[in-house]
Amino acid sequence: MIKIKILKKAGGFVLYILLFVPVLFLSAFSFIDDVSVKQTTGNRVRLILENILPHKLIPRDGGIVDTLFHNTSFTGNSITDTVPFSFIKKDRNNNIRYLIRGTYWISDRGIHFLLSDSLLINYKNWLVSPGNYIIYAPNGIVVAGISLSRDSAKISLGSQQALPGSPIDIDIQNLDISDLAGLLKVDTLMASGLLNAKIILSDLTKAIPVVTGTASVRNLELVQQLVGDLLLNAQMTDENTIHVTLQLSGNGNEVNAGGNFFLNNDQQQFDALLYIKSLKAALLQGFSKGNMSGVSGSINGLIGLKGKLTQPEWEGEINFDSTKFSLARFGTTYKLDKQKISLSYPEINFTRFTIEDSLGNPLILNGSICSNSLSDYELGINLNSREFTLINTSRAVNNTVYGFAGINANLAVTGTSRKPAIAGDIYLAEKTDVTLVLPEKNNDKEAAKSVVRFIDRDTFVLPQPGIFKAVADSNINFAQYLNHKLNIRADKKAVLNIVIDPSTGDEIKVNGDARLNTGFDTAGNFLIAGNYLLDSGYYELNYQFLKKRFNLMQGSTIFFNGLPTDAQINIRAEYIANTSAKDLLGNEVGTVDPRIARSFNQKIPFRVILVLKGSLKKPIIGFDIQLPGAGDMDGQLRRTIENKLVQLRADIAATNKQVFALLVLGRFVGEQSTDFFKGNGGDFADIAGESVSQFLSAALDQVASDLFTGINVDLNLNSYKDFTISEGTQKTDLNVDVSKNFLNDRLSVTVGKNFGIESQDGSAKAAKQKGSRFLPDATVSYKLSANGNYMTRSYTKNQFELVLDGYVIEMGLGLIATLDYEKIKGLFIRKNKKAGQ
């Protein structure tokens, strides 16, 4: 998009130019196909070029140049014929990384450029010699007096004569090439090393410019992998031939190359021979973008290259000698031992090319890749494996796939490199036990979609329709170009684990008979179709403190018909709860035969059924309670319980209540809150002794919270046996506390009493006699400091004594200090006050 605005101001006109290039298309070996510059008329000219190359560069051949320019701008402003300009490149944090300033003007000789006295290269200041200039003309370039220096590093450029087309001498001393590589790579260090060079550059207007001289790089590193020392030499042997030699040595690497470049032969532009005596395979790890790790071993080979630079022809072979590598995501380690790739233009041939896993199981490649162009290849590869390890990694943070997976595969890879096609069969081996973690839903992202932002249209450059369209995603989705048709089967003993909810740990573990087909749709989405019949497994249910395992029942299925996470599930699992039906049938006790009523205390293995239906990523969960199969249960008892369960299923809330009680308490609960206080015709003490203390305490607290607002009520029921006497005495105590806070919670008043509601000792009986006084315990606490480290507390405690036949009242006053310390002596050391306090 190009926007041009001309405004009339005092002293003349101002010309604004805004250039936005979302995608830059490149020819094969040039960044700029054509440049034209025209002189504008007027007294004032202002040029602004902003946001140059904000996205990845895409060559015309459809490949990707992994280069990203951030916050790059070119600006100029002038009221005369001389225009100051500046080139600025910033990093992701908006800090200036590269800065080149100067002026330019146009004359009959061409466009003149003059650099300022300093510039910034990779955050470092460089000095520029005065009197420098560059003249760009249609018939050549003139460079004079350009010398850049920083410490011992120096770059000098100059034409041998002040004439367009004259050879240009380039002298580079002690330059760290990472300073220049930073222009192309943003996130990682692409290359580093100390460069020294003496080069003569001439015939820039030809298809292949003439470059002669020598260059060396000490301690060369590529993508943070040490390579060694590089030496390059280029000399003209005749007017049409440049002979080039290359030597790479050090760090276990030894590579030599030599050949000729032909200046006036469009069909045969070069002829070279590359001899790789030894090259460490670890160099490949740096170019894998983190997908490979632990790469070791070496590569050797002899390769002949000739033809055009845009379409080279090859002949030779590449050998892998005990090369090992791991796939970082799946944790698998593979080995290439004495394997060979044969090169015979236009083909790259694989003959029983074998990749072995850590157990020695092979993956065998046979076939060839045929070149149509430098970036387009026809594929014809067959892959075969048996029990080949595909995944072998342990659970880790952000690891969505882990475990062990072995496959038997028979695949054919055809099509082209632009649109490959994969077809065949994959069989999950018996020992497979792999876990898939479904992604958590991003609630913040979903909530952000509902935010409406209001802007001032005068302060924003709104997008306009143009020739170019911005790329929505800079990462090309390879699946868009992949024709993928695979038949997948799973051994009945192969185990698949799916973590449905990573936040709670809800997990399903299944194994069964899977018959699936996979592929991609036109939008590049990975699809699965088919049915997974589950033979066995379990569902691990986690809800706060509740953790129960439900065993899968026969007939459960997972049906795939689209995206993997959209699979439809129909899973039934059961949990056995051994308990009596007494609390479930409490209301039916008086309506049945007394003999049957007594059998209500019989423990029965109730089946708690968990039902999961709907989408795999968001299943609908339901519960049911069923009786076990035919057994030694009385027929009338079974009918009575079945009738009750039928009534229960009509009320989902009631069903969930009983399921929760079975899972938490291991028993049923009464239908109404008053059931807690009924019992079998007894009084409050009877039911208190029969119930689960903690469960009832929670229920009482809930009731009290509803009845009393503005104060804190705590009811705690505790049923236990007191063995202070030989036979042991059953006791039940109910503690009631009522508290209220004042003065911003600094003053707290608590009144309470502990009631012995079931006991055989004399003091408890006397305390419950009619006429005994009710004297509560009281506590008053006051925080002397806001954080409560210092507190004063007064209390009164009333205890009934059988010997005195009355109450003993105990009163007290205390001072409480709370201190943090690591050693005892720290209690007696006064802490220094913070500054300013």
Image (cartoon, helix red, strand yellow):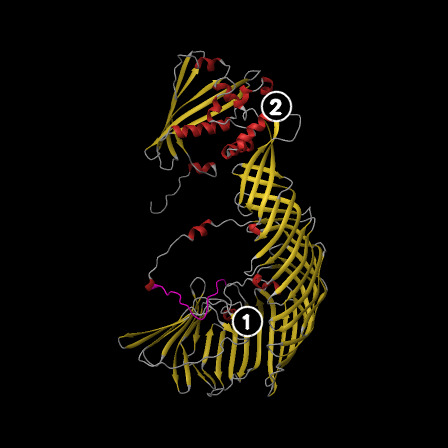
Q: Which residue is mark 2?
A: 636
Residue 130 versus residue 672 in the image, above or below: below
Question: Is label 1 or label 2 in front?
Answer: 2
* Secondary structure, magenta segment, majority class: loop
Q: Nearer the viewer, residue 223 or 382?
A: 382
Residue 307, x across and y down, in percent: 63, 79
Secondary structure type for disc 2 = helix
How many residues crowd around disc 1 within 10 Å: few (fewer than 14), some, or many (20 or more)?
A: some
Residue 727 versus residue 439 in the image, above or below: above
Q: Which residue is mark 1?
A: 194
Q: Nearer the viewer, residue 54 or 2?
A: 2
Q: CA distance from mark 1 to mark 2?
A: 94 Å
Q: Quadrant of the C terminus?
A: top left
Asked if residue 518 can be seen in this view, the reply is: yes
Residue 785, x across and y down, in percent: 35, 36
Secondary structure type for disc 1 = strand
How many residues crowd around disc 2 within 10 Å: few (fewer than 14), some, or many (20 or more)?
A: few
Indicate left or right for 237 with 780 as reference. right
Name which of mark 1 and mark 2 comes first in the sequence.
1
Residue 688, x across and y down, in percent: 50, 22
Q: Nearer the viewer, residue 692 or 615?
A: 615
The numbered dot on residue 490 is none
Amino acid type assigned to the residue bearing label 2 in the image? Gln
Instruction: Give the extent of the magenta segment.
Output: 459-473
Asked if residue 399 can be seen in this view, the reply is: no
Q: Quadrant of the N terminus?
A: bottom left
Q: Are marks 1 and 2 in contact (CB under 8 Å)?
A: no
Q: Identify the residue shown where x is 50% and y is 71%.
A: 180
Residue 694 versus residue 69 in the image, above or below: above
Amino acid type assigned to the residue bearing label 1 in the image? Leu
**The image quarter in which residue 752 lies:** top left
Magenta stretch encompasses residue 195 = no
